[in-house]
Image (cartoon, grey):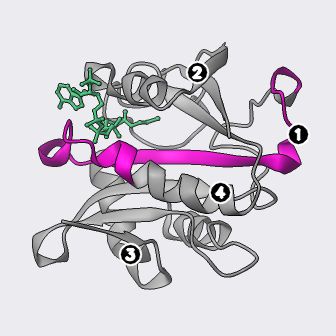
Amino acid sequence: MQIVPFTADLIESVKKFTDENIGINYYSIAEMTANQKKSITINNKITSFVLIGEKNKILGLRLAYPPGNWAHGKGSKLHPELWPFKLSEAAYFQSLFVSVEAQGQGFGPLLSEKSIEIFKQLNTKGIVTHCWKESPNNSSMKYLEKINFKTVIEHPDYWIDVDYTCTRDGFPCRCTALEMIKIL
Ligand SMILES: CC(C)(COP(=O)(O)OP(=O)(O)OC[C@H]1O[C@@H](n2cnc3c(N)ncnc32)[C@H](O)[C@@H]1OP(=O)(O)O)[C@@H](O)C(=O)NCCC(=O)NCCS
């Protein structure tokens, strides 16, 4: 298995991966194309990463955007007044998904570490994310706390306006997000 930057040639296969692992149409091709562009820094580095297995099968995705390239997550709820840094100084961790067969082996933290390395080079002050509270085996919260993210506020029904079929509870998605931050 190898971790590679999320380059434009991977957009279609990454969209197929998110359909299977997050839910059908959670991301459209247009949004995934925008996500790939949002991952490109001013000095042309890429802050989102993909885990690739045999026969080029996508096994994991870490979407991450540098400061200045994002304004909010998939939902619009955001509380910058609760962070010890400004929105303009913050990076954003969007989706992190590892396929079931590759979970629990540390790939999630490894993918995230690759993004953090680049954020540090850009003097980023902190990272913001929306943790999926009901993720299977509580894996989302466990991995975020392991890498020192702290919860600032809880958002019930965070994804309710997203027109997709959730892998946990179908449509509409009634899952909860925890807005979490990590100081760099
Ligand atoms: C969250 C996720 C990306 C973490 O990546 P990962 O490579 O599994 O990370 P880790 O190997 O560090 O595992 C994190 C924790 O979850 C547990 N875990 C992960 N997958 C598991 C599984 N299938 N069964 C039981 N426990 C599991 C691990 O044991 C570990 O717990 P520990 O720290 O107590 O040992 C991945 O598990 C995943 O894709 N989960 C479903 C989607 C999700 O919740 N995404 C985050 C949305 S915000």
- Residue 115's x, y, as percent? 53, 57
What is the distance, in whole Å, between disc 3 and disc 2 at their CAs? 29 Å
- Residue 86's x, y, as percent? 88, 39
Residue depicted at x 11% and y 77%: 55
Closer to the chain start, of discs 4 and 3, is 3
| Numbered mark located on residue 148 in the image | none
What is the distance, in whole Å, between disc 4 and disc 3 at their CAs? 26 Å
Q: Quadrant of ligand 1?
A: top left
Q: Residues within 10 Å of mark 3 (few under 14, many from 20)?
A: few
Amino acid type of the residue that numbered disc 1 sits on in the rendered structure:
Lys
Q: Which residue is mark 4?
A: 119
Q: Of circles 1 and 3, which is in front?
A: 1
Inspect the magenta stretch and tell me whether residue 56 lies in it.
no
Q: Residues within 10 Å of mark 2 (few under 14, many from 20)?
A: some
Q: Which residue is mark 3?
A: 12
The magenta segment is: 81-110
Q: Of circles 1 and 4, which is in front?
A: 4
Q: Which residue is mark 2?
A: 178
Closer to the chain start, of discs 3 and 2, is 3
Q: Residues within 10 Å of mark 1 (few under 14, many from 20)?
A: few
- For the residue pair 131 and 45, the one nearer the viewer reads as 45
Label 4: state its secondary structure. Answer: helix
Q: Of circles 4 and 3, which is in front?
A: 4
Quadrant location of the C terminus?
top right
Closer to the chain start, of discs 1 and 3, is 3
